[in-house]
Image (cartoon, rainbow, N blue to C red):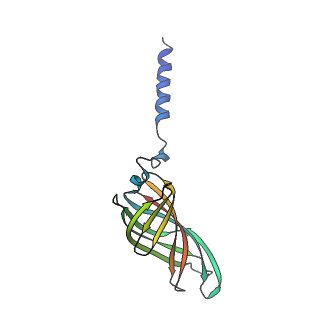
Amino acid sequence: MKLLLPLSILALSLVSVSCKKDQGDDDKTRTGTFEQRIAHTWRLTNVEYAGNMRKPFKSSQSVAFNGKGEDVYGEFNFKPDYSATYRMGFTALIDIGTSEPARLPFYRPGTGIWWTNSTNDSIFVAESVDTISYQVIEDWDDKQRWQTVLPILDSISGTFVDVDMQVILRR
């Protein structure tokens, strides 16, 4: 009997420890359907980008660039009635071979309708003339990571540069 009590306490404490969530798993839960998880207001918290553009003053040469966006801001509001409003902005720093990197600001607001595909791995936002596609990389209740390609106006050359972006949204 004396041995049974300590073994019972040990067994209960092991069960208790095994049921606790890891601290890093706080944003790794999924409830409801994919569309129910998306139909909320999301804050843009991070942008990683990559692209290729013509070098200023040497238009026959191009420069590849990538990095993490600075001054990131924005919000995506996906409503249950499938209407959507969003705005996103950040600054991309691009090493063009000068003493200071080129600062390429990006800002895009929009209003339209949204929908998902049948496999729930893409989200589409249709505006008056454009439809933006976001590939879903991570899908959690409080965190979304998506990939898309959007044009950024290169103010030096006056041309648009297609930029591959990964964005992180949080509720």
**Where 96 falls versus 121 (above or below)?**
below
Question: What percent of the width, then of the height, locates residue 64?
Answer: 62, 74
Q: Nearer the viewer, residue 111 or 29?
A: 111
- In the rendered image, the quadrant that contains the C terminus is bottom left
Can the viewer see residue 118?
yes
The image quarter containing residue 61 is bottom right
Is residue 157 found left or right of 27 in the rendered image?
A: right
Q: Nearer the viewer, residue 24 or 98?
A: 24
Q: Nearer the viewer, residue 160 or 113?
A: 113
| Residue in the picture at 53% in, 67% down | 165
Question: What percent of the width, then of the height, locates residue 131?
Answer: 46, 70
| Residue in the picture at 46% in, 57% down | 144
**Where 47 falls versus 98 (above or below)?**
above
Can the viewer see residue 98?
no
| Residue in the picture at 45% in, 73% down | 130
Is residue 94 found left or right of 32 in the rendered image?
A: right
| Residue in the picture at 45% in, 55% down | 143
Question: What percent of the width, then of the height, locates residue 166?
Answer: 52, 64
**Where 160 falls versus 46 (above or below)?**
below
